[in-house]
Amino acid sequence: MLISEDVKLDYSDVLIRPKRSTLKTRASVDIERRYCFRNSKREWSGVPIMAANMDTVGTFKMHEALAQFHVTTCIAKALNTEEDWWKIAYKEKGREYIAIMAGISDEEMNRVVEVWNSTRMSFIGIDVANGYTIAVVDALKKLRDKLPQATIVCGNVVTADMTAELILAGADIVKVGVGPGSVCTTRVKTGIGYPQLSAVIECADAAHGLGGHIIADGGCNNSGDVVKAFAAGADFVMIGGMLAGHEECAGELVFEDDNPEPIGMQFYGMASETAMEKHGKLITNEYRGSEGKTVTVPYRGPVKPTIVDILSGLRSACTYVGASNLKQLSKCTTFVRVNNTHNTIYGV
């Protein structure tokens, strides 16, 4: 047993100190990024925000809405058999802003290969709660061998050593985050986790040293948290709860009395009882339990105003620190701890 006494921080533990800026308007800030990925050698450009591949968020309707803003949607694994994938194959635009994610079973891996060969979309990925197992590394190596030109996402992890191992095994992008999501109960159920801001900083440092990239996955409750993730070195930021409750989502609607207008929508974690029952993974064994919860979020109509608000917050943050583009944001960032008696300043 070891105890690490290093300070580890979540998004709520810090703010970003403003700095002198010559920018006159948010409109002058470029929030798109261009990346060339380490293993696939493919290039991609767009706004590096991703809708999470959760049942209620990662839908094809969400993709249609977010692609207009050059934002990527990771399609829920339950939809990997949908005919909509073949529609993507024939679209001139949109393929660069969509991802197919899967577990590590042979059936799921074969489906990923099949879809990628037909669509040549930007991203494919291995998505499991625990990215530390040898089975994940082995699956990643096999997928890389089958698809040497595909940009592969793999996760989830929260430490520099495993980030490096996944990149060296074939991942272009590593998903970072264990337990920070609003409907994830892993930290409560297992005691396992890592404060998300520190995880992003440490994993980004490891990935960038190898020419790899990371996704900050989970823990963002508002646009300010998205800003902090990018400021900490994240190449992409994945959000789920912030997009829940919109008409592009697939959650069950909630009504009140005789009011024909919905007042809420169901939103659940992918390790919740709701998700497991839906996908035939009933808790019938003593060793298996849920690590997610089901909640009702307010119904919020179309997603467009929400994504505009997030992107607006990102642009505004850049003007506060003098960053003319998103790439410069982390270089212009000084984090200030706010949840302790004595504020401490950290430059990133």
Image (spheres, grey):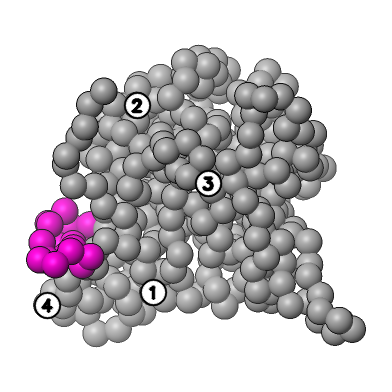
Q: Give the range drawn in magenta.
A: 329-348
Q: Which badge, 3 or 1, comes first in the chain's sequence?
A: 3
Residue 264 on the magenta span: no
Q: What residue type is labelled 4?
A: Arg
Q: Residue at x 45, y 43 (%)?
A: 187
Image vertical order of residue 326 relative to residue 104, above or below: below
Q: Which structural element holds mark 3?
A: loop
Identify residue for label 1: 313
Which label sits in the foreground, 2 or 1? Answer: 2
Q: Which badge, 4 or 1, comes first in the chain's sequence?
A: 4
Q: Which amino acid does label 1 sit on?
A: Gly
Identify residue for label 3: 185
Q: What residue type is labelled 2?
A: Met
Q: How far apart are marks 3 and 2 (CA)?
A: 22 Å
Identify residue for label 2: 162
Identify residue for label 4: 20
Q: How far apart are marks 2 and 1 (CA)?
A: 32 Å
